[in-house]
Structures are given as C-alpha cells and as structure tokens.
Amino acid sequence: MPTFYLDDQAIEFEPGEKIIAAAKRAGIDIPHYCYHPALSVVATCRMCLVDIVDMGNGRPAPKLMTSCSTDAAEGMKILSQNEKVVEGRELVMEFLLVNHPLDCPICDQAGECTLQDFSFEYGSGNSEMEYSKRVYGWRDIGTFVTLERNRCIHCTRCDRFTREITGTNEFGVFNRGHQLTVDTFTDQPMTNKFQGNMADICPVGCITEREFRFKKRAWKLKKTNSICNRCSTGCNITVEEDKNKVFRFKPRENQEVNQWWMCDDGRISYRDYGKNKNRFLQPMGRVKGNLVKASWDQIFEALKSRIADLSPNPNEVVALSDNFASNEELFLLKKMLADVFDSDKIFFPLRAWSQHETAYPIDSLITTDKSPNRAGAIALGLLGDEDDAKLKEALSETVKIAFILGNPFNEDNEILELLAKAELIVYIGTENNHWTEKADVLLPGQTHVEKEGTFTNKNSRVQRSNIAVKAPKETKPEWMILTELIQFMGKDADFHTSRAVFEAIGASNDHFKGMTFDSVGDLGSLLTSI
Amino acid sequence: MLEETLVLFKNVRQPGYSGDLASYQSSGGYSALKKALKMKPEEIVNTVKESNLRGRGGAGFPTGLKWSFMAKGTGKPSYLVINADEGEPGTFKDREIMLKEPHMFLEGYMIGCYAIGCHHGYIYVRGEFVPAMQRLQEAIDECYQSGLLGDKIAGSDFKLDITLHPGAGAYICGEETALLDSLEGRRGQPRTKPPFPAVAGFNGCPTSVNNVETLMNVPSIINDGAEAFKELGPPNNAGTHLVSLSGHVNNPGVYELKMGVNLKDIIYDIGGGILGGKELKGVIPGGSSTPVLRPDEIDIPYDFDSLAKAKSMMGSSAIIVFNEDTDVVKFLYRIVKFYNHESCGQCTPCREGTNWSRLMLRQFVQQQGTPQQLKRLYRVGGNMMGTTLCPLGDACAMPLRAFLEKYPEEFQAHFAEAS
Ligand SMILES: Cc1cc2nc3c(=O)[nH]c(=O)nc-3n(C[C@H](O)[C@H](O)[C@H](O)COP(=O)(O)O)c2cc1C
Ligand code: SF4
Ligand code: SF4
Ligand code: SF4
Ligand code: FES
C-alpha cells in the first residue's frame, strides 16, 4: 500500500483516500467539525488544517490544507502539530467562537462537545468580539430533537444527514453569510425516524435529544457496550448510566450492522429500564390462590416436590419462550426440558416479517421483526411456526407443567386459555403480565441491561450485550435461574457464568461452532450455516 | 494620447451598428465558425493555447490550457458553461457585450463548444440583467432560425443547443463551482476541490466554465491566428480586453484596450481625467476585491503580470477611480459590507470574518474607532486570507488590508475623540 508520513509516522492509505480518513484508521484524530466519514466532504469548517511540507513531489503546499479534502499521496510529508498549524487552528477557533454563546453550563452537549474541547486546546479563552452576539429565533422542529441555533457552528452535518443518509430532506440550510442557519423546510416538524443521530453528529449543543434535555451532565455517565433489543437488527449501542439509572442509549459504530446509527424507537427504549414499577422482585409461589413471597431455596424445594408429585410424562411438559431471551437462556431452557423431563416441546413465536429496503442503507435498520433473537431460537432448534399450529397441537393434549420465559404469545388468548389448564405453571421473567396472573411460581429474572448474553440478529450475527447496571438484590439472571433449576432437579449443569453457557453452546451446536464471548467480541460474529 | 484598439468592439464602434445577425454577418461574422468547423477540435484547442488567451473572468487562467484539462473518454457528455454572472462591483463589460455584440460572443462560444465536444451549452446570466438576457435570447433565436444552432450547425454535422439560465441574485454564483450548483438547481455554494470542474463539473460531467468576454476573443484568434493575437499585448498577456472604467473620471464607460497600456494613461487619456478637476486619491485596478493603488503607484502597464508585480490584480479589468473628496473609511466599509452580504456563509473564516470586519468598520464610520480596533481589524482581515474555501474570503480581506496599509491616516482620523 502507498504510504505518507504524518508527523514522521508512516501511514498507509488506499488510493483516493483523504488524509484525515487514513490518519483516523491509524488511530490519529485530526481536529475537525464538518468532516464525518458517513457524509460527503464539504471542507467548510477549516479546522482540520495541516501543513503539507512535501506534497510527494518534493514541493510544499502553498498554504495550510484541509486534511478532510486533500487526497493522500505517496511520499507526502505532513505536519499537524507545528506552530503554523496550531496558529491556523487558533484562528479558526476564534472565528467559531465569535458568535458562540459559550453557555456550556446549561448546554447538554457540555462534556462531549468538540467545540468545548478544541477551544480549551486552541482557544485564547477570551473573545475580542465586542459586539452583541448573533441571536437566531427559537424554533420548535417537532418530535425527537431540539434546536438551539445560537450554538450552531454551521458545519452542515445535519443538513447532509437528511439529504444523504435518510433522503428525507426535511432539514436544510437557510440564508447566507453570517445569517446562515439550519431549520426545517416550510415550518414542518421533522419526520425521519432517525433524528437522534442528528444530535449525535452535531458536534455542538445545537441539536440535542429532547429526551435527554437537562437530565444529566454527560461526563457523569458511564458507558457499557451493548446492543439494542428492540428489533432483530440489533444495533450496537452503549448503555449510559449514572448511579444505576439508565439515561440514554447511544449508537456504537459497527460497519457490519448499524454503521454509526440507530433508530429513534430503539433509542428511547432506554425508558423501559429502571422503572421497576410493574416488576416482581422476589420469588413467589401461589398458596391457596394467592402469591406469597419466598426465598429462592424455599421456592426451588417446593417446586421440586410438586414436580415429583406430578411425575409428568415427557409430552406433558412444555416450555414457551419469547424472542427476547438470549441464546444462553434458550439453550438452558431446552437443556432443562430435555435433561429433567425428556421433553423437546419448547416453542417460540415465529412470525412472518419483512425488510423495507430503499436507496438509503439506513432504512434497512428498521424491520417489522421486533424479535431480537428469533434467529437464535431457530439455530438452537426451538419449535415454532407462523400460525403456532405445532404449539396448539401440543397444548391440545394434557399438559401438566409449563415453563414460561419472558412474555411469549401474549397476543393470543387461545394459547393462554389452553395453558391455564396446566397443573403447574412456572414463570421466569421480570414483569407482571397475564402469564403471572395464571402462574403458580414466579421466578424473578433480570432486564436486558442488568445481565449479559448473546443474541442472533436477522442477518445471523451473534452479538453480545453486557451488564450495564446492577440488578435488584433478590433477582437472578435467567441463565442462573435455569442452571440452578437443573441442578436442583438432580441433573448436571456446571455453569458459573453466562460466558460458560455460551461456550457450551459453541461446543454442542454446529451453528455456533467454536464461538466464545471473546471471539464474538464487541462487534459480533456470524453463525455458521449448515 | 492613448486610444482604443478595436477587435472585439470593431463593429460596436461603427455608427448605426445594430448587432443583430444580419449586421454581424455583413461585417464578416460567423466566418470563423465556418473555418473552425473544418478544423479538428484539438487544433482549435491548440490554437487557443498558442494564442496565450487568458480568462477574462478574474483569475486570468490560460483558456487553452483549461480546455486541455477536460477529462476525456469518460463516456459522459462534456460541457462548456458560460459565466455571465458579472457581479464584481466595478465590472460591467459582459453586460455591454450581451447588449451590443451578442453574436461575436456566441460565435466564439460555438467554436469553443465544438473544440471541447459540448453539445449543450448553458449561459448563466446575472438575474438582474433583464434587457441583456432578452437581447442575448433574441440572438440565440436568430441563430436557431438561420441554422447556426440546432442539429447541424452551419451545415456541419455538429449538433449544439444553447440554453440561457438566469441567476437569482447571488454574487457568489459567479464563482464557477457555485454557479454549477446553482445551475443544477441547488443552493449556490462553492464546492471543495478536487474534483475540479474539468473532471466533475456540471452534473458530475467534465466541464469548463468560462467568462463571456473570454469566448468573444475566439473568433478573431481563429480568423487571424494565434500570432496576431499575441502581438496585441506584452508577452504572456495577449490580446485586447474590455476595461470597465468607473468612479471619479470624466468619461466612465467600457473601453477596448490592448493589454499592457499604461494605467495612468487609461485614467487621464481615456477617462478624461479626474471628475471636477480634483486630485486623485487612489485607484482600485481590477474590481472591488483587488488591492487599492495610491496615485504614485499607477504609472504601470495595465495587464495581469504587471498588476501582480504591483501586489494587486487586474481581476476583471474594472478600474474604480476615486478622488480627494472620498472618505476612504466609508468606501472600504461599503466594500466590506458587500462581501459580508454576499458571503455564502459555509466556511468559518469568511462567514464570521466578513461580518466582524464590517462591524468594526462601522464603528470607524461612526467616528468611534480606536487604535486597538485598527490593529484588530487588520488582524481579522489577515485571518481570512488564504484560509477560506473559495476566494471570496480573500476578496474581502485583500482590499481591507490594502486600504489599512495605504491610508492609515484616514482611519486614524476616525478614532473616537477620547483616543
Ligand atoms: C466570488 C467569486 C465571484 C466570481 N464572479 C465571477 C463573475 O461574475 N463572472 C466571471 O466570469 N467570473 C467570476 N468569477 C471567476 C470564476 O470563478 C471563474 O474563474 C471564471 O468564470 C473562469 O472564466 P475564465 O477562465 O474565462 O476567466 C468569480 C470568482 C469568485 C471567487
Ligand atoms: S446544527 Fe449542529 S450539525 Fe447542524 S450545522 Fe449546526 S452545528 Fe452542524
Ligand atoms: S433498528 Fe432495531 S436494533 Fe436498531 S435501534 Fe432501531 S429498534 Fe434497535
Ligand atoms: S469563502 Fe465565503 S463565499 Fe467562499 S465558500 Fe467560504 S463562506 Fe462561502
Ligand atoms: S473537517 Fe476539514 S474543513 Fe471541516
């Protein structure tokens, strides 16, 4: 590969690649605002200046060049730290701050604002502009994001986003000169389903997430890598929390899945966590029609003796799971059914789904398939069909014991009615719902952000979610509940971590052959098709 | 006594010349086109190259060289787009051409299109030039009617259509890439380069953008040859050019002069001296964006290279003369206000710098300047220089710095009482 030198470090580049992009691949961040790898190059902020002392032909560039718009060339020698460059950046910063309100104390972007960062690094700290600053009128642009235009640095990333990424064009640049501003067209509210990304790519606090407004100082948030479980795309995200409370989800770059983006529905699904309003937080058993709290040992003992009393035949035990269960949970549920009851009647809802495709790749994130682990359930050999015929057939026979994981088949009362006849319903999950009304035993599990696990997305990519917040004391992750259940029933299940469960999957299922938490890593890895 | 040299305006200066097709043809018009259509396109490009014709739009870039940069074999159409946006204050010669001698320009344009293989030409005309646009459209219509435009132009196999496109009132759309964006129906803003228009211009196709007057030179180059053209000016500054002379002179107007004549002679011989018999205070030699010259600096040849040597520019050959009564501070304020108003705003130094400079200058105009502010004005101006995406930032900074350097006493006279 051809090579150039940035501050004496050799950097390889693809022909046609811009200096800033090649440097970034080599781990060097040249300060910039308007450049974004997803967007066309406009070279307007003028922040990414570098000094090309040799253009590769022995001659220096006549002036400082913008590294976002200059092609790398073989043998180029570039300085990005010398006095000339620092001075160049300082003067760009001065111009950017001339009209900027510098209201960081009340700005949600503070702490993750590159204007703030670079003004610390390259700013003089005091503005020589002695006139009143530019003020744009307040604009309400509708749904998901807020616009504080006085903070705008006119990088036009937002404009290019609705033009080039969503193709919705509802947002754009108006006026010119120092009155240049961003706004929606014809006073309409924003319409695209990916608006939160505009807040992410806005380098300052001009576009921010309405949801996050004034909620938290960004630098207080701790971030954990995870994936969104709102649909089978499984966008890579960070879960951001403080004091065990989740404040937001942010997309995490994964070129194979979601690039830099996520949809607004997924983004606000953070709201589902930490409320605990409708949640049961202790094991419970039904005594004379009423649910009473119990310890884990008490409940397992009671369960064991009840199962012994019922001594069911294999075909009298079923398990139902939703598509939000992880690969490990499904594996263990299936293992329990097989090892303890010799039953293979484990069902999940398999639903028809479709994928909307357009000329804009971002649209392929949103799918009608709202099940984050449907593909995992299939790969692990769970039973399911589109009209639940197999399940209904199984339920038409005598069912003595039913295990319910999550909230499956909740749209179909017939299944609920059929199952209500079972003599023992064991529910594993987090929230009270119509299953818990019928259940005899409730085992408190944990939410997506409280436990770790792997999920298989619609394109057969296995991805990891991690523990982002501490779970309530009496709850246990589902993989642990199932492991302990198996052990209580006298069978082998020697798993101390979900990592170990996943390795057992890798060792026993050809789709997952050889996979480990480490091999899946932060960006996931594909199932083997067999 | 300096006089005009008539090549471009040889017909225009004839009493009673109407400029319609019949009158142009009866004075030999469109003979160059017929000659050119029998040449190979490369031959024409080479002849223009040899003639040393330099663009009359402001930058003085060699036209033949520009044409030879056009990407070839791309499978895409090539375009020759005409810049008739003429927005630089002080410049009013393209309008004069369109009103008085549209056919000589059109003939040159057709030859140019043939030379670079353009089958659909666009002329981007400044929106305010309504009569000029009408006149030009009439001339185009005449060409279609007489077979000079259309499927087989002038009886050859060459197909050419020409479309007029009015601008919408933005000076920045005179910058060639902003012009192309505007022509494509988008917001007119300069593009970052590369890619250059010669590679990806109009609709992503190889494009050359040229000024009206530049093309008007082509018929005589084809008819009389490159050598004859070169002889009309000093080395490297060939030909005649149309000079817009305005300000405090007795005879303002558009004059055709050989390259390299004395600037002082232009003002005193052609312009008839300073209005009202006053003292000369200064000259802006190439449109409002070019650095001002003091009276002791104007005894120089008027051509691209000589002006560059004098640390100014010939730009679009627009001379603005001002006399001793002129308040230089107000004058500069007006110029900066123009560039501030016309900045497209996309790049940081120009968007913020032109406005900040304007605000500071306004204080001087209001007799509220300070020494510290004078220094700051100079610094802020400098910070716009060479740091912007397109030359509009320079266009504001160059006159700003030059006025401050050359007339410091005038700015000091606008300090507030206390300082
Ligand atoms: C801000 C700005 C405004 C310009 N306005 C004009 C104009 O009105 N007319 C013009 O011919 N060229 C104008 N130019 C120059 C064009 O960009 C371009 O160089 C020219 O049209 C090329 O033609 P030429 O090679 O025939 O001179 C302008 C340039 C800038 C930077
Ligand atoms: S709103 Fe943000 S992203 Fe859009 S132009 Fe302004 S600073 Fe850039
Ligand atoms: S597209 Fe799906 S996975 Fe991605 S953020 Fe939206 S709901 Fe979540
Ligand atoms: S220099 Fe001025 S006019 Fe040119 S691109 Fe930048 S902001 Fe626009
Ligand atoms: S990042 Fe290069 S000019 Fe903005």
Image: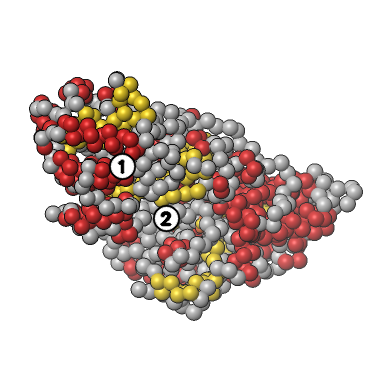
Observer-nearest of A424 and A42: A424
- State the image quarter where residue B30 is shown: bottom left
Element under disc 2? loop
Q: Which mark lies nearer to you, 2 or 1?
A: 1
Q: CA distance from mark 2 to mark 1?
A: 44 Å
**Residue holding disc 1:** A481
Residue at image coords 71%, 46%: B359
Q: Is residue A195 at least partly visible in the picture?
A: no
Residue A428 % position (x, y): 29, 35
Asked if residue A341 lies left or right of residue A239, the reply is: left
Q: Is residue A38 at least partly visible in the picture?
A: yes
The answer to whether marks 2 and 1 mark residues whose Cβ atoms lie closer than 8 Å is: no
The disc label shown at residue A37, or none: 2
Residue at image coords 32%, 52%: A496
Write down the chain letter for disc 1. Answer: A
Give amino acid for label 1: Ile
Q: Residue furthest bottom?
A: A58
Observer-nearest of A424 and B5: A424
